[in-house]
Amino acid sequence: MDSLKFDTLISEPGLFEPAAYPGNAFFEIWRNESESQVREGNLMDGEVEDWVNQSGRFAIPKALDENVGYDKMRLMFNPTATITAHSFNANTRTTTGIILQTDDGEAEAIKERIVFYKASLGCQLLLQTILVNISLVGCADYLWDLKQDVLDIEHSTGQHTWDSYKARDEKPKPDVELSRKAHGLRIEIPDLCRRVNVASIWIELLLESLTQDQGSFATKGLIIQWLENMKIQAKMAKLDAEFIAKRVDNQVGAVYNRFAQRDNITMQKISEATNRDSSAMRSLAVLGALFLPGTFVATLFSINSLQEQPLWVYWVITIPLTLLVLAAWIFWTRWRIEDVRRQELVLDEKVIA
């Protein structure tokens, strides 16, 4: 929020005409020891200058003009521009300001606080104090939304101890969405901390200004106490934000664990399928070892010079040859298994060392 002197800003010709920034509205309040009066509405084309100069329909009511012992605040609101300006006239105890980029809810909240603290209209820092309070309330609302988002993620991952919490959306969310949401919170939480820190700086500056101010007014102590309370609220909000950040980090780890568990399950299925394929290949290898020697001997006996040999000669050669091939295959398989084990032991010893 840029803060400028009202007198300097309002001198820009046509800057706040409705044609340039539609939606200008005004709010004015007068108060003395016995009564107060409020006037508000929208500014039409060509009325900004009348409002600034307090002329036309914005002239000071005669009953108040005759009584100089009153405090006054005059504000202009605009939802589109991005500047805030203010000025305080100590002689007339009048605060004049332009509060821009405010929606209807924020403008109403500012008006309500001004009316509630109308006894402090003579304080030149009342408007800044109200704006800091509005900012801090916005931070509290933002913090509440972040808490709800974290609770929803915790509910989905099951990594929580909030047995009584009911999620806003009971539908199970995919891990990709949970990861995106958790990383989004990692970005939003620092933004919240920045807002709280800015509010804390303003609170410190306002407290310092009020403490060093030699002047006095009836509700000075009330404003100081209000700022002290906001100071505590800002500290609590920062602590809550830091705690939420740790919870988000835990949930990011939980989501990654869910990814890892799913990957492990997938790898286990792949491993089981590979083992099945290996068993099938091993069966084919055994069958090949059983029939290959007999096939080889039969091929030899198909030669013309060996066709006259009796059948028992075929079995005498085939059976020992088959047993020899099977024994060689079993020996080679066991040797390979032992060799793999020896390599794993060597690697384990290197890791331990």
Image (spheres, helix red, strand yellow):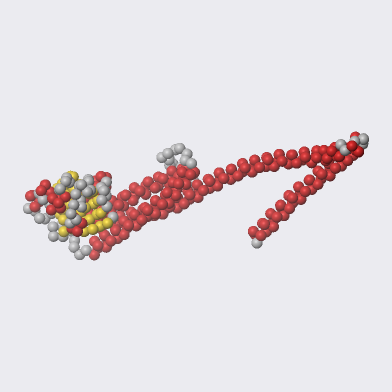
| Residue 180 appears left or right of 82 | right
Foreground pick, 272 / 234: 272
Instruction: Give me the residue at 19% from left, 56% from top.
Output: 12
Viewer can see residue 219: no
The quadrant the N terminus occupies is: bottom left
Q: Is residue 259 above or below residue 203?
A: above
Report x, y in % for residue 67. Answer: 8, 53
Q: Is residue 148 left or right of residue 55?
A: right
Quarter of the image for residue 325 reads: top right
- Residue 265, how many percent across, how many down? 59, 43
Q: In this orientation, which residue lies closer to the viewer: 320 or 330?
A: 320
Q: Residue at x 55, y 47 (%)?
A: 260
Total number of numbered discs in the rendering: 0
Q: What's the residue at 69%, 57% (across, down)?
A: 346
Instruction: Tell me residue 306's x, y (percent).
Output: 90, 38
Q: Position of residue 128 (x, y in %)?
A: 24, 56
Q: Viewer-proximal residue, 320 or 212? A: 320
**Residue that protrudes farthest toward the front in the picture:** 304
Q: Is residue 320 or residue 309 the one in the foreground?
A: 309
Residue 205 visible at all = yes
Q: Give the quarter of the figure containing the C terminus.
A: bottom right
